[in-house]
Structures are given as C-alpha cells and as structure tokens.
Amino acid sequence: MLALSLPNSKSNGNGAHRKVRAEIVGWGMCAPRRVMTNDELAAMLDTSDEWIRGRTGIARRHIVSDGETTASMAIAAAQDALQVADADPREIDLVIVATSTPDHVFPSTACQVQDALAARHAGAFDLNAACSGFVYALAMGHQAIASGEHQQVLVIGADALSSRLDWTDRGTCILFGDGAGAVLLRATDADAGVMATVLGADGSGGELLKIPAGGCAVPTTHESVTQGLHYLRMDGRLVYRFASGVLAEAAEQVAHKAGWEVSAIDRLIPHQANVRIIESAAKRLGLPMERFVVNLEEYGNTSAASVPIALCEAIEAGTIRPGDQLVMVGFGAGLTWAAAAVKWRRSPEEVYVSRQRRWWRWSLYQWAHLRSGVRRGLGRLAIWFIRTVEGRDDR
Ligand code: ACO
C-alpha cells in the first residue's frame, strides 16, 4: 500500500473538511500496428473513401494482428500510464478494465493485466458498459478512492471489436477500430481530479446495438456461427439519434453537478463514434468545435478505448493544460451513457522518469512474466502428479 493514507475527507486546519478525490496522474495508450484505410475497405465492399469520410469523419482504423489482443493492448497502455506516473505497480489497489471484447469470458482481462504488471496487491475485474465503459470505470475508480478504501486505481478502456465485425456488412465494419487507453488514479485532497460523474442506462434500447450469440441466451453452436449471430448488429439511424441527444445531455448534467457553466468547459472529450454526432452535440451545447477533442480520422470508433485514447493524444499535443475543466462523455450499447467532469492539474512537461526507474519497472515486468510462467508450470506439474498417484491407487 502507498504510504500516504487519506481518509475520505481531510481537515484543512480550520475544522473544515476537504473531500478526497481521484486525480489522473498517469496516462497511456496503445493502437495496433496494422492500419486499415478506407480505400482498403472500398476494395472489399460496396463503399468509398468519400462516403466513409463524409458520413463519419473516419479515414483509417488500427486493427489487431500477429498476436495482439485486448489484453496485450491493455497491458501496453497500462505500462505507459505507470511510466508517466512513475508508479510502483505493487502499490496499485485495484485494476478495472472496461471492455466488451475480453480475450476470454474468464479469466478477466483485468486479471491478465494485474499479472503482467506484477500488481500483486491489486483486486481486478472487468466492467462491460460497451462504449461507455471507460467513463463508467473512471466513475467506479473515483468512488473507490473517495470512499477511502483505495489509494491508487488503474482504469483501462480496451477493445478489439474487429473480432466481432461482419466484414461484409458495410453499415457496421467501416466504423470500428481496435485500441486501448489507460489512466492511473491517485487519491488527492487538492481541488483537482474527478469533480462529478453521471451514469445512465436504458435497457429497452438493447436491441439497437447487439451481438446476439455467444452468451447463455444463444450459446455458440454450428448454426449460430453459420447464421452470423456472433457479429455486431446495429440500427445505425436509431443509434445515431440516441447518441446525438445523450452526448449533449450528459455533458450538461455533469457540468452542472460539478458546479460549472457549460460555457466553462475547456475541453470536451466525447466517445468517438461519428464526427456528425459530435458536431450536433456542439451545436446543442453552444460550444465551438475547437473545444472538442476529435481523433476519429485516425482510429474510428474504438469502443471503450476511444475516450482514453483521445485524452492521451490531447495531453501529449498540449491542448489540455493545468487548470483546464474537462468533460468526458461515453455512450453506447446497453443502451448506456456516462460522463465525468475532471479538473486537470498535470502538465506533460512535468513528467520526468529517470532511466533507472524505467529499467526497474521493465525488470519487474520481466520478473512477473517469469514468475507467472513458473507458477503455471508448477500447477500443471501438480495436476500431473495427482493424476498419476490417483491412477496408481485405482490399480
Ligand atoms: N458505404 C456506402 N453506402 C452506405 C454505407 C457505406 N459504408 N453504409 C450505408 N450506406 C448506404 C445505405 O445503404 C443507405 O442507402 P439507401 O439510401 O440506398 O438505403 C445510405 O447509405 C444511407 O444510409 P443511412 O444508414 O441512412 O446512413 P447514415 O447517414 O445514417 O450513416 C452511419 C450511417 C454512419 C452508420 C450512421 O447511422 C451512424 O454513425 N450511426 C451511429 C453509429 C454508432 O455510433 N454506433 C456506435 C455506438 S457506440 C457502441 O457502443 C458500439
């Protein structure tokens, strides 16, 4: 555990109590190496670069290949976030991975991350709220810290929806890409960090965006595979209408909950689904498009990874500065939506990590890998031994 131990409120010396919040102290992202352009899609489908750019704002997307998975991207993004925060992975209390495309139903992707980081004092779980997942997880991480229960929480949004797309359906496959983004949250009693959150859901809209098979309602069978029931299905127009409304509403609600005027939002980081959805929300909120972080052109819709990837890019580009008031909004399948108001404090120029600390963290990851491999091997050996002994008893 981190030496700093904050209760959920702290006296400021005048008898008044200051609230403990979660502050983002580290950030990182991972995009797969393989880039797929609109022209490549146009060679496979009845579509064009012009149509995709004009209707969505997307020019390229990154797609997993050569052993890349949701977990491998999540681990890479998390390692970057720990580097920026110069954190000791053994002091992380909780790992939350927001994903709807985990490597396996179980073990959770969060457990794979926990193991790879040598975060051996951390609890770990996956959270599924589709494209709203990262902001949901941020809210959960904030609550875990504000309750006084935890000091450091690693929050990751990671998805590889390319594995669930029908690459012959031009209405869906053009929209999505793969990636991961991570933030490290740390307890602070300063007037910074997560100031307010809003979570919402409307399960009656579940049919609008769905992967019909693979759960217990429609288990995997030969028929479910041949009927293409494991692919993402979407009613694009209705999802579009839902998204345009909820993005503006959630942003407004969370700003008011934080005590801010909408006009005082310095940067709005929306889920990257379609640039027209973002433009429509900008109009409704009366904010200029320059206040919105948009990176759809490069990544498309990376589901739970889209908000943290946009956040990382904006920080690195210097468009988020200390003192800025940020609003992040996610929306997606469920239907779900979530928003967070964050007062920013760190500047990328402050980030300095010595070569020794980098090397030490790298060694820790190698050690974690080795230790995990040995434990797995010993487990298999123990099973073999027990079976051999049982076999001998039977005789
Ligand atoms: N290329 C060329 N033409 C196309 C393509 C394509 N890729 N896709 C659809 N069309 C055609 C349609 O067939 C239709 O033709 P028709 O008029 O002859 O029938 C025409 O273009 C217009 O189709 P619309 O569906 O009305 O197109 P629209 O302007 O609504 O754009 C889109 C479609 C981009 C899918 C839009 O509806 C959208 O972005 N919806 C929101 C999707 C979204 O954000 N989903 C993710 C939510 S987050 C999550 O949790 C996963």
Image: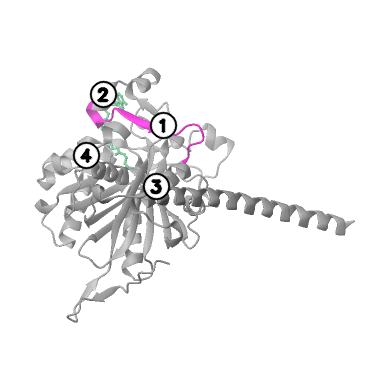
Q: Which residue is mark 2?
A: 51
Q: Amino acid at mark 4?
A: Ile
On residue 248, the disc is none
Whole-angstrom CA distance, mark 1 to mark 3, is 26 Å
- Asked if disc 2 is less than 8 Å from ligand 1, the answer is yes
Q: Which residues are magenta?
A: 54-69
Image-quadrant location for residue 21 = bottom left
Q: Does residue 326 show up?
A: yes
Point 17% across, 38% down: residue: 279
Residue where numbered disc 3 is placed: 355
Q: Which residue is mark 4?
A: 277
| Label 3 residue SS | helix
Tell which circle, 2 or 3, labels the residue nearer the N-terminal end. Answer: 2
Residue visible at 30% across and 32% down? 298
Magenta-span inclusion, residue 64? yes
Label 1, ligand 1: CB separation under 8 Å: no
Q: Is residue 163 left or right of residue 334?
A: right
Question: Seen from this angle, which residue lies furthest top?
Answer: 43
**Within 8 Å: ligand 1 and the Cβ of disc 4?**
yes
